[in-house]
């Protein structure tokens, strides 16, 4: 079927209205009418070819929510009209150790929701800035939030799971002091989730203007990271730091805040590397530098259920699809509180 989408034909071109095709659902497929799609900084990195290997046309979008509009003959868990989501993963090998453990995000053959290999035209996957998507049932998530919150649920499918997974992996909870660096789409979810898990949360921002807002998100303390004396008040006191910053920066000022055996996990994926950290900053307190990528399908469902139970959604600003180019420029300036979400009904026109 032919549908409308918003995407780019080259890395130096603005996004524009495109016509794309979706396969007819096969036995294990779920077809979704997309209601809303969140706008992740990864969309911008990918569509502008800031990471290697972008294929064009590129239709970004991996924070997808909508309603099931068709199911294949062997699909049993989803029915027409169900509220569902799709995140960053639409396929994987389904038989390696990672897939067996529900860690499809670490499968060597994981297929991303956009720019991944597929038999479908045009030979690479096309994401959620589009009217519909067809996805194997294994990668479809169930949404139990009230329907009125649907748009604000969309960002949970990437920003939510990318922060939830490392917070769980590094045992964030009561009695732990946790730093969240960068208060953008990912960071604001990191604050909400770490707070809901019972940790003491310190938010680190470069934006003085976000100081009060970060408290409203659930931060117990907020530090403007440019102010050395403010940073010093947390020296050697944090158990874990989640770093979501989308640009290269000095990591050492944050390592100095970790306790002995503390870990800083990077989830931000800048186009060019961070300056290498000082080795002594790590070895003197047995500190660790780690990374984490989104999360597996079972953990994504767990995160959605956790958020529904705790009344957690993203703070969003809704846009029309044809406002996406302006939204990208604003995202680069940190001018969004805290996630743009596309109203996919605007693709009808
Ligand atoms: P975002 O909304 O643009 O937020 C990034 C935040 O980083 C900004 O709001 C800003 O917060 C801070 N920042 C400080 N200096 C910056 C600079 N020079 N340029 C840009 N940001 C700066 O982005 P996002 O959607 O949260 O994504 C963050 C990063 O995570 C991106 O690189 C994205 O590709 C990556 N990502 C990784 C995964 C994964 O699986 N690991 C998944 C999704 C996204 P303050 O104003 O508070 O300083
Ligand atoms: Zn993302």
Image (cartoon, rainbow, N blue to C red):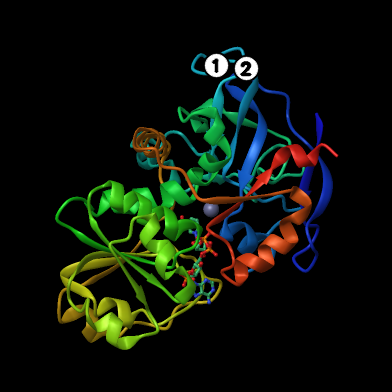
The dot on residue 24 is: none
Badge 1 vs badge 2, beta-carbon distance below 8 Å: yes
Residue 178: % across, % down: 26, 62
Relative to 226, does residue 97 appear above or below in the rendering?
above
**Disc 1 packing (10 Å; few <14; some 14–19; many ≥20):** some
Tell me where residue 264 sits by quadrant.
Answer: bottom left
Residue identified by numbered label 2: 72
Image quadrant holding the N terminus, namely top right
Image quadrant holding the C terminus, namely top right
Q: Secondary structure at mark 2?
A: loop
Residue 333: % across, % down: 60, 72
Q: Residue at x 15, y 77 (%)?
A: 285
Whether residue 56 appears in this view of the structure is no
Residue 270: % across, % down: 52, 70
Q: Nearer the viewer, residue 239 or 109?
A: 239
Relative to 252, does residue 292 appear above or below in the rendering?
above
Give the CA separation, mark 1 to mark 2. Answer: 6 Å
Q: Residue at x 18, y 58 (%)?
A: 176
Residue 275: % across, % down: 42, 83
Q: Residue at x 32, y 60 (%)?
A: 219
Q: Residue at x 32, y 87 (%)?
A: 228
Residue identified by numbered label 1: 75
**Disc 2 packing (10 Å; few <14; some 14–19; many ≥20):** some
Tell me where residue 31 sits by quadrant.
Answer: top right
Q: Is residue 324 left or right of residue 2?
A: left
Q: Is residue 119 left or right of residue 75?
A: right
Q: Nearer the viewer, residue 276 or 231?
A: 231
Q: Nearer the viewer, residue 268 or 286?
A: 268
Q: Secondary structure at mark 1?
A: loop
């Amino acid at each position: 079927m032919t549908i409308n989408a918003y995407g780019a034909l080259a890395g130096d071109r603005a996004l524009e209205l495109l016509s794309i095709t979706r396969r007819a659902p096969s036995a294990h497929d779920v077809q979704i009418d997309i209601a809303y799609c969140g706008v992740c900084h990864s969309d911008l990195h990918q569509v502008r070819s800031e990471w290697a290997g972008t294929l064009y046309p590129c239709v970004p979008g991996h924070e997808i929510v909508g309603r099931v509009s068709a199911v294949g003959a062997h699909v049993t868990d989803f029915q027409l009209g169900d509220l569902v989501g799709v995140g960053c993963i639409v396929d994987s090998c389904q038989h390696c150790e990672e897939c067996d453990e529900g860690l499809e995000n670490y499968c060597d053959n994981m297929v991303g929701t956009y720019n991944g290999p597929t038999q479908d035209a045009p030979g690479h996957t096309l994401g959620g800035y589009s009217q519909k998507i067809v996805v194997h049932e294994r990668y479809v998530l169930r949404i139990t939030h009230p329907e009125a919150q649907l748009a604000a649920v969309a960002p949970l499918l990437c920003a939510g799971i990318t922060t939830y997974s490392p917070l769980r992996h590094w045992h964030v909870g009561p009695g732990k002091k946790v730093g969240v660096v960068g208060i953008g789409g990912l960071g604001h979810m990191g604050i909400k989730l770490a707070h809901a898990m019972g940790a003491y949360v310190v938010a680190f921002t470069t934006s003085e203007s976000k100081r009060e807002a970060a408290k409203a998100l659930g931060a117990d303390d907020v530090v403007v990271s440019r102010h050395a004396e403010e940073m010093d008040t947390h020296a050697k006191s944090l158990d874990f730091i989640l770093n979501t910053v989308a640009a290269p920066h000095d990591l050492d000022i944050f390592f100095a805040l970790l306790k002995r055996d503390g870990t800083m996990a990077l989830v931000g994926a800048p186009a060019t590397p961070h300056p290498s950290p000082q080795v002594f900053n790590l070895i003197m307190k047995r500190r660790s530098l780690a990374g984490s990528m989104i999360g597996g399908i079972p953990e994504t469902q767990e995160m959605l259920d956790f958020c529904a139970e705790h009344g957690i959604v993203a703070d969003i600003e809704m846009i029309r699809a044809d406002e996406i180019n302006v939204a990208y420029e604003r995202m680069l300036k940190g001018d969004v509180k805290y996630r743009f979400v596309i109203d996919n009904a605007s693709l009808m026109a």
